[in-house]
Amino acid sequence: MAVEPIAWLVNTWFEPAHDSKGGWIFLLCAGLFFWSVRSPQQAVTGKTHKKAVILLLVTAFIRGIGQVFAVNVLGAVALAIDVYAIGLLAALNDRKTPLSAGWLAVLFAFSLPLERILQRIIGFGLQHLSADGACRVLQGLFADVQCAGIRILLAGRDVLVDLPCSGVKSITLLLVLYAALMCVLRPTLLNSVVMGLTALASALLANIIRITCLSIFIAYPEKIGGINVLAQPWHDLIGLFCLILAAMPLALLCPPRRSGEEGSQKSPSHNCPQPIQAGKTKTLAALGFAMLAAVIVALPRQPLDISDTRTALSLPLYLNGQYGQTVALSIQEQAYFTQYGGTAVKMRYGDNSAMLIRTNSPLRHMHTPDDCLRGLGFDVHYQGIQYQPLPTAIYLATAPNGAQWRIAVTFYSDLGQFTTNVSEVVWRWLQQPHSTWYALQRITPVSIPESEASEWDNTLFAALDLTSVHFQENSHAKPD
């Protein structure tokens, strides 16, 4: 049962599209496990083994759900429960150098592409929360501050709190540190809760401080000698400093490490291993597990969130003096956009190209260009957002042969909602799950002037009648 989830998880560590550092977390978990298991074992109880067997039954149930609904991440989450069961069977809590088997499982869970998942699900909410916090701090420091959603106007400079600034990365990194500390220190439940809440609050506050600093330095670059804080290495150095700042409360609250003997006083009758079952009963239980695994793996996949494919999808046949030529989707693009019912069409107009994706299940099919292009071997860098005439995210993509392309993407729904990031798409779709979402991606060579690329975008918007839809939607919005 674990073979396919393990293969999927390992693939996320090496697949550029996932951009996951989970392999390093796995190595940390493996190192901690062997560090503990090499020390002498002090006590084992039959209850521990029974709990491990129950956990294996739970993971079998979870994998069954993941198999039927074709959700790979559920099978991978079950691996974390497997780690907990293995930790119990190895008696990590009862060794001379003990570890918490439960917290080791939590730490292992971060080897999954959790950052990417959290960015898609809660990134939009964190983005606005961070922007609101930074705005309040700036309004307390400066008089000329105006805030509108995720946009902050300071000293005439427009500062955008974009999705990468949501704070998901800092929260994820701090929670990795928190889980590692809990695994080694094994604090009481109360201390664990206090430190967990502290970690979340510190991560959010540190992100607000980071956004505040960036906003000030963008508006007043002369205060730091004209340094562009959005360029490397300054941007990452400010983030690293704020992350260290966020980790300090955890360091201050760390309780002393509990030894293996502490809290594990057992009666003499519990000092020897007690097998759960013996003889034929144990053999039958093993055969039962094997049969259950065979049934689960053989279950047919019937995902609930299959997108509608009955309505035809098309791009203009003629655009800006060029006839369109249909381009077949690559194998990777088919996997990204059309698996489980997604619809996608791609056309080339001279040197420019356009791709249109439609789905009723954005969690399955909606990806930012950097996700799919990295999977195709491109080096992708996010460039920012343009709001006119339609909200558009801009990326710079460098092909393996050195060719560079401007990638522009706009997401919109059949309800007239427009956005530049997948997180907001998912956020709005969860509120209106019957809505249909589209992603319009435009690819133009970097060598052509920006004005020509914008003109070509506008022509495509007009051909799809998107500009008028966006105008009508904004005209019904109330002024700030």
Image: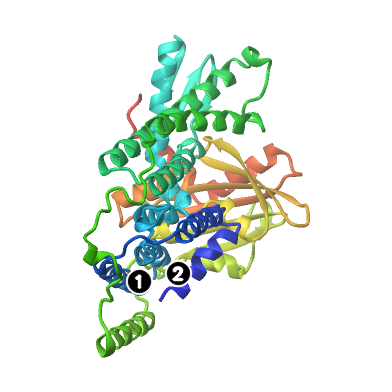
> In terms of image quadrants, where is residue 294?
bottom left
Is disc 2 surrounded by few (<14), some (14 to 19) or many (20+) residues within 10 Å? many
Rendered position, 219 above or below 321? above
Please give the residue where the numbered disc 1 appears in the rendered image.
Answer: 63
Please give the residue where the numbered disc 2 appears in the rendered image.
Answer: 5
Name the disc covering residue 433, or none: none
Left or right of 88? Residue 19 is: right
| Residue that appears at 41% across and 33% down | 250
Q: Whole-percent x and y of residue 13?
A: 56, 59
| Residue 467 appearing in the image | yes
* Label 2 or label 1, whichever comes before in sequence order: 2
- The amino acid at mark 2 is Pro
| Residue that appears at 35% across and 71% down | 63
The image quadrant where one finds the N terminus is bottom left
Left or right of 95? Residue 158 is: right
Is disc 1 surrounded by few (<14), some (14 to 19) or many (20+) residues within 10 Å? many
